[in-house]
Image: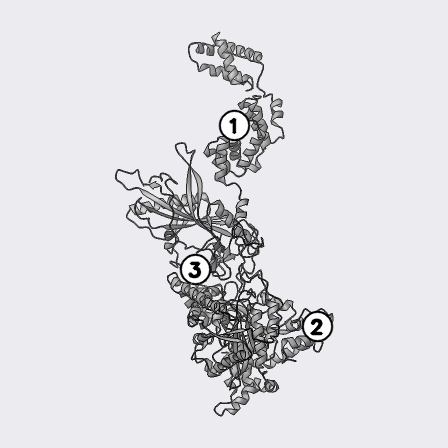
Amino acid sequence: MLGRTLQEVSAALKQGQITPTELCQKCLSLIKKTKFLNAYITVSEEVALKQAEESEKRYKNGQSLGDLDGIPVAVKDNFSTSGIETTCASNMLKGYIPPYNATVVQKLLDQGALLMGKTNLDEFAMGSGSTDGIFGPVKNPWSYSKQYREKRKQNPHSKNEDSDWLITGGSSGGSAAAVSAFTCYAALGSDTGGSTRNPAAHCGLVGFKPSYGLVSRHGLIPLVNSMDVPGILTRCVDDAAIVLGALAGPDPKDSTTVHDPINKPFMLPSLADVSKLCIGIPKEYLIPELSSEVRSLWSKAADLFESEGAKVLEVSLPHTSYSIVCYHVLCTSEVASNMARFDGLQYGHRCDINVSTEAMYAASRREGFNDVVRGRILSGNFFLLKENYENYFVKAQKVRRLIANDFVNAFNSGVDVLLTPTTLSEAVPYLEFIKEDNRTRSAQDDIFTQAVNMAGLPAVSIPVALSNQGLPIGLQFIGRAFCDQQLLTVAKWFEKQVQFPVIQLQELMDDCSAVLENEKSASVSLKQ
Amino acid sequence: MAAPMLRWVGRGRRWTFAQVDGGSCHRREAPTGSTSNRIRGRSSVAQQPLYTTQKPRKGEHKWAAVVGLEIHAQISSNSKLFSGSQVRFSAPPNSLVSFFDASLPGTLPVLNRRCVEAAVMTGLALNCHINKKSLFDRKHYFYADLPAGYQITQQRLPIAVNGSLTYGVCAGKKQSQVIPKTVRIKQIQLEQDSGKSLHDDLRSQTLIDLNRAEGQLRVDANISVHHPGEPLGVRTEVKNLNSIRFLAKAIDYEIQRQINELENGGEILNETRSFHYQLGCTMSMRDKEGKQDYRFMPEPNLPPLVLYDATSLPAGADPQQVINIDQIRETLPELPSVTRERLVQQYGMLLEHSFTLLNEVGLLEFFQNVIKETRAEPKKVTSWVLNTFLGYLKQQNLAVSESPVTPSALAELLDLLDSRTISSAAAKQVFEELWKREGKTPGQIVSEKQLELMEDRGALEQLCHSMMEAHPQVVMDLKKGNPRAINKLIGLVRKATQSRADPAMIKEILEKKLSS
């Protein structure tokens, strides 16, 4: 039952094959078994069980709230949850309990979903590995999969050590690990430069970033307001569409949500043929850093579309290479601004120093934020200085416009969706990953995903195949603004063609107690 | 030290954009609490009067002062500019604070429609150009009563620009003559308010009230002096002036201080100053942090504010979702300058009288109601309302709405006067009776007190005759060629009639008798 998709388990609930409480308990016990993955910061067991009880009553009375009723879900720990600690994996918000639910959380609960807990991330979602939060790094469930372990056994050079585990990608790594390890059926991530799609690709999941303005950001603790969107992580495209159907729509509490009605619910037709479709391949995305395996899968995917009758065109997004540096300026500037409210006065961490208000601010912020956050605040404030504003912020905004226009031009040339890699390669081991600093990693890892956020477009990463090492590789589809349904329809067709294998965690489940013992010391030392 | 010669004299001077935004200090603001949703207007005032410390000697340079005002006015609305929480005067501290007001992480601003309408209306009333598209910016500084670490304002592209306001200044020999003046408005911007810091010096604590709904007006004045024809001087900014009286005092003081400083070889620092209410002087605020850089940035959570007019309104637009400038223009009440002009035209009153009528809340309405009900000449009504009625109000410190005399009562009284039923002296007496709130009509008072004019000429002649007989000395004086002596007789007769007789008739009878 746990390995099923959301759609399947929803059907099972409706048919009475399993009750919400049974499902909830199974997930809770798996969460405990896979605790070493560090996917969850907070497990809201009591809340989930109570919600399951209520859901069960509704099913008994024939008053199910719909597809999400009784479905266990997880939420990234940067969405406000009423009465449940929301930390952003930062000392600054340790112990902070919001008095309200983010709109997306409320919508999930209104549909009867069960909130299993809050998932791990990079501090304030700043990172691409889910390695830089105060609760320690998240471990990729694929590190423990049969597929990966068998490949490693075949490789005489690999040391078969459990400490050689892989990162999930980030910053929504906890959400990705939670879905990938079957502890829930869908999870919310956030996506500012690829934070949902990147871990989805590394964890063999569907990672969907909706159009900016389609889903409310109210209650999402911001990284970059003008680029943030709540993201959806699921095991298949149809599941993502179901969740999107529950979340999409205007929110009076978020003035950037759009009022134009979009077909709801997001039921995805099964495309019979793709002959009317035009797929664009952006030539600038073919870069030397791209691993040969990803490159070859990308080109195979293009061939697949072509062989099935779709038109496949090479397109140009000429300003792509400026995206990283432009993002750096815009992101850090908004970060500097958004982080200003964390002064230790009303909520969050407050230091013991009380000589003056200024001294208290300085010490609280020094203690509360990690180096990555502080570094971004510092650069952002530099870019916003009166003397620098025109040279940096305004220029970056102009470049952002050019990047957005690149996409518009591509779509105007007749392309329906763009097909690109999601990441440069499959997931790397943690010890490998931390050889580079957060900034370098983020710049590299966001390379295919970030321009989409600049343009506010919908994009989805679809798991395609396993690498030679037995690890998932994802490809990304990018759609026209607010053509989320069309995008997902194409992705669904593609998903059906590629038949990505299910993660085999049986071994992990069976001897997870052993793994747990082994990992205890390791994780303690990593958590500092 | 001679007092400034004239305030508000000379041609209006407008700040250029470069002048207002040029110095980084201009917008520096010691963040203290004040109002809730507010409109910030930047008048680019205003004046180039000439100042000297002493009477100018020949060849001596005169000084001109330039003043710019930044006016923070609270919008009268039910809820705050960016949140649904209420605005209410003197509510208990922190009782009207939404999650957004407390800047809880993840909360977003939602623009209040009523505040936008009020800003558009203000812009129209002040002859501004209304920007069809305006933007919101974040202005950053750390302060305990600014929980987000920034304030949302309209720095770069505000809702209204380039307006003007015509007003009158009392001047001239009698200080009663009104000289019309125009001040130019640089911009009107919607701005979120900070909270309020309450300093408890005893416990050395600062308490924060995030209700943000106190005080309806706050003004920062930018002041500089220079010699006419020479470049503008360095300006200072006097912050947080919360009454018109203190504003005027602070400006006067600051102009004089700068002149003295410069004439004594000193220099003016581009600094922020505060006005000390008790001492009546301005003092440097000695801002420890030095020049602040507010690091302005576009507010990403609010889309551009787009306004429509009849020509640009999209077909089928939901009236709840759009704001139509033309529609707001239609709801504008008659503006004071138009009203004043109308009063002068329609009733032939002096311009200064029209100012007085408009400056006192409710007085114009009172006046118009009297006019409606009386046959008396408008000039008579003006005189009674502005002299007698307003005089009584002022003396007892009452508002028009608290007046014991209704417009109908005054109208009836003026009718009695107009029909020559009573003399004006008797009318004053009736008015005084009305003021006692005894519920009597002027007619009742007149008949009870027998204040009607004596119509019986025979009786009056009789009275004059006996008065002449009783005062032979006065009659002698008159006959000796002192014509003013007749006034004494008139006065005596009037007194005997309890002011009921028409003095003109008395005079006529007396003259007739004397010449016969």
- Circle 1 is placed at which residue position? B380
Circle 2 residue? A56
Above or below for A8 versus B72: below
Quadrant occupied by the N terminus of chain B? top left
Residue closest to the far left: B59
Q: Is residue A34 above or below residue B477?
A: below
How far is disc 1 from disc 3 in space, using C-alphas?
58 Å
Are both tags, 3 and 2, on one chain? no
Chain where mark 1 sits = B
Left or right, residue A76 beside residue B62: right
Three-letter code, disc 3: Phe
Q: Are there few (<14), some (14-19), or many (20+) residues within 10 Å of tag 3?
A: many
Q: Amino acid at mark 1?
A: Lys
Look at the numbered discs 3 and 2 and tell me whether their residues touch, using CB distance below 8 Å: no
Residue indicated by mark 3: B296
Q: Chain of mark 3?
A: B
Residue A223 in sight in this render: no
Colour scheme in the image?
A: one colour
Residue A144 x %, y %? 56, 85
- Crowd around label 1: few <14 · some 14–19 · many ≥20 (10 Å): some
The CA distance from mark 2 to mark 1 is 85 Å
Circle on res. A282: none
SS at circle 1: helix
**Mark 1 or mark 3, earlier in chain:** 3
Q: What's the residue at 41%, 54% (across, down)? A: B27
A360, above or below B161, in the image:
below
Q: Name the foreground residue: A100 vs B395.
A: A100
Residues at circles 2 and 1 in contact by the CB criterion of under 8 Å: no
User: Around disc 2, counting alpha carbons within 10 Å, would you say few (fewer than 14), some (14 to 19), or many (20 or more)?
Assistant: many
